[in-house]
Image (cartoon, rainbow, N blue to C red):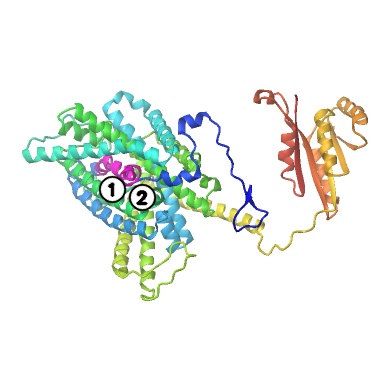
Amino acid sequence: MSPQKNTPSTQFIRRTAKHPTSSLSHYLLGRPLSTADAAHETIGKSVGLAVFAADALSSTAYATQEVLVILAGAGTLAFGYVFPISIVIVALLAIVVLSYEQIIHAYPGGGGAYIVASDNLGKIPALVAAAALLTDYILTVSVSISSGVAQIVSAYPQWYEYRVAMAMFFVALIMVINLRGVRESGAAFAIPSYFFIAMMLFMIGIGLFRIVTGSLGTVINPPEIEHVDELTGISLFLLLHAFSSGTTAMTGVEAISNGITAFKEPRSRNAGITLIWMACILGVLFIGISYLTREIQAVPSETETVISQLARTIFNGQGILYLGAILGTTVILILAANTAFAGFPRLSALLAGDGFMPRQLTYRGSRLVYSYGIFALGAAASILIVIFQASVTRLIPLYAIGVFLSFTLAQAGMTRRWWRSGKLNTNIQPQDHTVAHPLHYDKRWLVKMISNALGALCTALVVGVFAVTKFHDGAWIVLILTPILIGVFLWIHRHYANMASRLSLENYGEPPPYNARHRVIVPISGVHRGTLAALRYARMLSDDVTAVHVSLEPEDTEKAQRKWAKWGRGTRLVILDSPYRLFVEPLLSYVNEILASRQPNETITIVVPHFVAETKLHNALHMQTAELLRRELLETPGVVITEVPYQIP
């Protein structure tokens, strides 16, 4: 050991050579990584696209179908509106992506809508954005994996009854892969992600070629339309409802801004380029799929997805190319959950660092990932899958409203940031290094402010459309859950703030002098070697030692008294008679009497003998009285508890 530089000589740093011992988890998750390896666990643009864009890209597999589900209420003639609706959604995508590209460069530390709202709009808007995003991440896992299972069921209908079990298996699989670390999970997902992109572009290309040549027909033996209750006619409400369902194609756009720290340096530049790549691919796939869906007259169905109908129509049956399209779609839908597993732990860690979620969420596991956040997301998504029976149509109404709420707050926050930037002095640029996100004058602040304001207005209108058109479909759950989550955040923050104020050393001054008097109490159930070991330790602490025995059976008490007379060495023994055979209550009552009469400068220590069994199986054969006492006495103020373990050699 040697003193640390520029520190008092009483402070030392000792490097440990100990490494984590091998365990089953190491074989499953990989060898533990040291903190110094964090810089090597970052990812580049190509892998980043696979990690953070899978959610957005995969949504093209079901977004078109969800538009058709709503349009089906007006009959098959309404299906022609799917393409114009898709164009409007892609235009909205361009506006949102432009805003998030600015966020990435303005806030390179990540955090997305939460950090933007916190920095520019205040605590409550930031918590609204956080609650909305966390809810959306949970739904992303549930919807994407349920949709992936739906693709499998489309090809193999006999597996329909096992869809919930399959979905649960895939949640566990993605969770384990993410526990292995960002770099490894990205490498594992890169090939399937690019295979999906290539397969979809190939399918769209072939489909467009067949339209030009006039060889593309309509769906042969289309499934029955299952979601039509009554013909309502084509109305503005119906089109808005379909539009709101189609905007699920935009979920996941914000993930890159939340996970900027996962990218290699220069982080902002790499993350921004990845975002543009993702938006371009997403727009092409969504418009292409929607256009071809209209041309082949595909219909929405739980038994066969729109992608399946497209693939077997374009590729003339269920041959190798059809299976390739279904395989690519299934894999990307399942891997889309990885985007949430990359974003949820990081966002929850930020919230935990600010005191709004449990501190455990800031802990990085053996592979330098936020393990507790990954486990929490997997558990929450699994519960939703079971409740909604892995039905995409039942889960979709809960989906996307949260992410659009975060879109709105992020763009509103950026609007205010650019307005603040425009008010700065153009000549004097203060360098305040104490500010986490320093603000500088931007000569294009007015253009950026107007673009962000327009984006905030558009996404706010979408949130309104969601709230109205999907309220009865289940969106009310999200509208209620978000305020509840905010209340939980505030309650947790209040607890941590209260603890911090009570433990703070501000204005604390010098600690009080050491107590002059020390009283020790030793609870005993009998007199044996373990009791004497605790008694010897108690005498080392003080000369004022009292042994306490709770009398449950007179015969046992007499036996303890006889042994104490021989082995107690003059230490006083207090017998607490308990005619109703209560053990803890009489002891606590005695301790409380001692506390009530203690002197101001007196410390009371309870020394508890603790038997340690050789194995856990042997442990079950003993009452573990010491553990029971410790739990009860921990809640008694003014008492120090010391356990003296003893083993049987």
The span shown in magenta is 44-70
Q: Is residue 531 left or right of residue 272?
A: right
Foreground: 244 or 366? Answer: 366
Foreground: 589 or 599? Answer: 599
Vertical placement of 104 versus 556: above or below?
A: below
| Disc 2: CA contacts within 10 A as few (<14), some (14-19) or many (>=20) | many
Instruction: Indicate whether residue 57 is drawn in magenta.
Output: yes
Q: Is residue 589 left or right of residue 122?
A: right
- Residue 75, by quadrant, is top left
- Disc number for residue 292: none
Looking at the rendered structure, the secondary structure element under dot 1 is helix
Cα–Cα span, label 1 and label 2: 10 Å
Discs 1, 2 touching: Cβ within 8 Å: yes
Determine which residue is flagged by label 1: 278
Q: Is residue 399 visible?
A: yes
Which amino acid type corresponds to the residue marked 1 in the rendered image?
Met
Image location of residue 151, percent across then percent down: 29, 32
Vertical placement of 601 versus 421: above or below?
A: above
Q: Quadrant of the C terminus?
A: top right
Vertical placement of 229 versus 283: above or below?
A: above
Which amino acid type corresponds to the residue marked 2 in the rendered image?
Ile
Residue that extends furthest to the front in the rendered view of this protein: 2
Point 51% across, 46% down: residue: 361
Foreground: 458 or 450? Answer: 450
Image location of residue 503, percent across then percent down: 66, 56
Determine which residue is flagged by label 2: 256
Image location of residue 411, percent across then percent down: 35, 60
Point 32% across, 37% down: residue: 333
Q: Earlier in the sequence, mark 1 or mark 2?
A: 2
Q: Is residue 115 left or right of residue 491?
A: left
